Image (cartoon, rainbow, N blue to C red):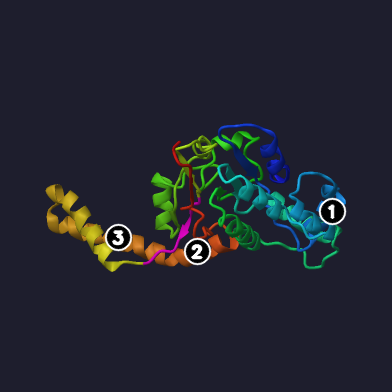
Amino acid sequence: SVGAQLWARKILQEFTYESAAVIADSFAGVAPAGLQGMQQKNIGLCRTDLLAEKRMIDCQAGTLEVQRVFEDAMEDFPEVAFASIDSKVDLVQIAYYELISMTLLHSADYALTPQNFAESLAAIYRRYNLHPNWVSYLVNSKNHMFLNQEIMYNTRPGSTVVKTSGLIGAGLEIAGVEFQGPDTKLTTWLGGLPVTPGNSISSVCRGVAPHVASPEAGVATGHALGGMLGGTLGATLGSTLGVSLNTVKTSVRSGLEPLAEEGAELTGLSRCDIGEADKTFSRLAE
């Protein structure tokens, strides 16, 4: 992923194409402050022709970040789709951050919680989201890398294992975990790249939605169920049963919802920033 971000501008300059896409898989560059610039300089990046000339000063000063290099490519090639795929709680990126902090930086404050990682990732995504030709696919998982693993074929934004919709989604909703956002499979989403003229691709993120109790909705649900059962049990019994079932559901949810939302926040899985699920890159038809 780092290589794709650093080499994108150079490769796009070298090749001729009708449509192109750059995919950064699972390394957004969440790193301790000051580390990236030091590493870029030490590995000799400043002596290559991968950088725009305006970035040489930053590179020599040891302040250049991979995000800035990636953004330069986005700006220089506005008709090319740039895409990032990341897990909201990428354990490899977290381990890398902590290992580097302990060994190279000798920092006593090296721990990076899942929530802090998710917040740092969201900050990087906010930068990228300012560029019209950048989109993202966020996964509620701890997995690192998708494109080179069989897990790619099972991945959806809600999970790398199961669909967070249908029956499972209904069960999670009762427990106070209600998801919002598209449930597009990663393979389906990747099929939209590169973006050809006249087509588009949208970012994907599926997160925990805060639940707001609605007494009116509960009564309506009860009466609807009552109507369905009325032919057999009678409208009165059906209506009463519907309201009772909804009351049980509400009681369970009210007890579990605070725990579910707190757990989602602590694990970083609840985060879907504005623009992470509704950003679209389109190309005009020729």
Q: Which residues are magenta?
A: 205-212
According to the image, label 2 marks what residue?
A: 261
Which one is earlier in the sequence, the residue at label 1 or at label 3? Answer: 1
Majority secondary structure in the magenta region: loop
* Residue drawn at the location 39% of the way across and 51% of the way down: 170
Q: How far apart are labels 2 and 1 at the CA level?
A: 42 Å
Q: Nearer the viewer, mark 2 or mark 1?
A: 1
Q: Amino acid at mark 1?
A: Lys
Is residue 142 something one can see in this rendering?
Answer: no
For the C terminus, give its image quadrant: top left
Which one is earlier in the sequence, the residue at label 3 or at label 2? Answer: 3
Residue situated in front as seen by the camera: 20 or 232 = 20
Q: Secondary structure at mark 1?
A: helix
**Mark carried by residue 41:** 1
Q: Eyeballing the image, is 52 above or below 217?
A: above
Residue situated in front as seen by the camera: 284 or 88 = 284
* Residue drawn at the location 75% of the way across and 48% of the way down: 51
The answer to whether mark 1 and mark 3 are in CB contact below 8 A is no
Residue situated in front as seen by the camera: 136 or 196 = 196
* Residue drawn at the location 66% of the way across and 45% of the way down: 144
Q: 10 Å neighbourhood of mark 1: few (<14), some, or many (≥20)?
A: some
Q: 10 Å neighbourhood of mark 3: few (<14), some, or many (≥20)?
A: many
Which one is earlier in the sequence, the residue at label 2 or at label 1? Answer: 1
Q: Secondary structure at mark 3?
A: helix
Q: Position of residue 227 (x, y in %)?
A: 16, 53
Query: Is residue 265 left or right of 219 when viewed as pictured?
Result: right
* Residue drawn at the location 79% of the way across and 59% of the way down: 58
Residue 119 within the magenta-colored segment of the rendering: no
Quadrant of the rendered structure where residue 112 is?
bottom right
Q: Position of residue 195 (x, y in %)?
A: 51, 38
**Mark carried by residue 246:** 3
